[in-house]
Image (cartoon, grey):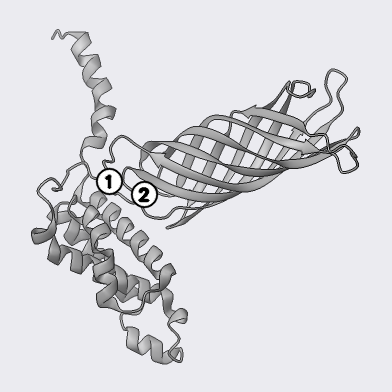
Amino acid sequence: MKFNTLPFALALLALPLSSGAFASPDRQADDLLMDIDRIVAVESQQGWLIDRLELEDTLPQALQSVCRSSNQAREGALSEARQRFQEAGGDVEAALARVGGDPGEIKPLLNAQRSVLILEYAMAKADADCPVWLRPDPGFRGRQTDRDRFSVYFEGGGLLTLRTSDVETRYGGGGSSRVLLGYRSARWAWLAGGELGGAGLVQPDESNDQVRFHMFSAVPIAARVHGVLWHMGLELAPVWSLPVSRDPARLGGRVALQLGYTPLRRGAWLPGIGFALIYEHSPAQDGLEVEHILRAGFRASFSWDPKHSP
């Protein structure tokens, strides 16, 4: 049997591109429940007090996800949420009595119950409140996370810098900006991209307060492990010190740790904030001494992927 190899090859290439166009009801239910869990986590941090008021307050965010999910996915998410609530204890009043009335001692049970309440309330309101342009999407994979997809990450912030060698020690402040392309699974994210930054550095014993400008570029490669709201990351990167303000050009390496927090989505963007602790090492080269650099500071971030509308 003969067949045209070009259409066959194009069909094979189209398979991975079209695989993200449909999500099974079970998978969509899992993504919907993750969205609800994140809404609960954020609201609980801010202080959940009166259920009726909290349900009204979270309804717009919840409907953003519920309206996009199929009826089967909604029912699956609600069934899973109810099962988790029962596994966590299933009786808030009895649990409170056992711990002397302190709700802080039964947070997992309360959060499990709140996920059920938000889902039930949003599902009851969906038929009347979902706008005509916000309908079930067979490719919906969750709105409040960037998992199971590629995203572009824009990150930047201020950094305190300490640079030392056998010749001199300098300290100061500056910042960096970077763009990363990443893929996140349910728990892990892998990112790579480019970074450009700089700092103004002084010596402790310089009487004339002369500032030396230090600029650098890097190609960071990072792995991050995600919870509901928080993530931790490890980063490695080659780093180039640029020839600016009498600083020679030189090559070094970086290892960095990051702790980050991701709140709820704002339009098409998923914001975040993190703290980074960075160590960079430049070996002796071309007559230059070994150099050590410590950087620490906060970063703001925004992730974007083309599948998310505002």
Quadrant location of the C terminus in the rendered image: top left
Q: Residue at x 88, y 35 (%)?
A: 168
Q: Residue at x 45, y 53 (%)?
A: 262
Residue 143, above or below 113: above
Q: CA distance from mark 2 to mark 1?
A: 9 Å
Residue 12: tell me if it is visible: yes
Q: Give the mark count.
A: 2
* Drawn side of residue 271 relative to residue 178, left or right: left
Q: Secondary structure at mark 2?
A: loop
Q: Position of residue 83 (x, y in %)?
A: 27, 70
Residue denoted by label 1 = 141
User: Which amino acid lies under the numbered mark 1 shown in the image of this protein?
Assistant: Arg
Instruction: Give the residue at the far front of this rendering.
Output: 208
Quadrant location of the N terminus in the rendered image: top left
Disc ID at residue 145 = 2
Q: Give the quadrant of residue 238.
A: top right
* Drawn side of residue 246 relative to residue 262, left or right: right
Q: Secondary structure at mark 1?
A: loop
Q: Residue at x 77, y 37 (%)?
A: 201
Q: Which residue is more in the foreground, 256 or 24?
A: 256
Q: Position of residue 225 (x, y in %)?
A: 50, 49
* Drawn side of residue 245 relative to residue 68, left or right: right
Q: Position of residue 212 (x, y in %)?
A: 78, 31
Residue 226, above or below 9: below
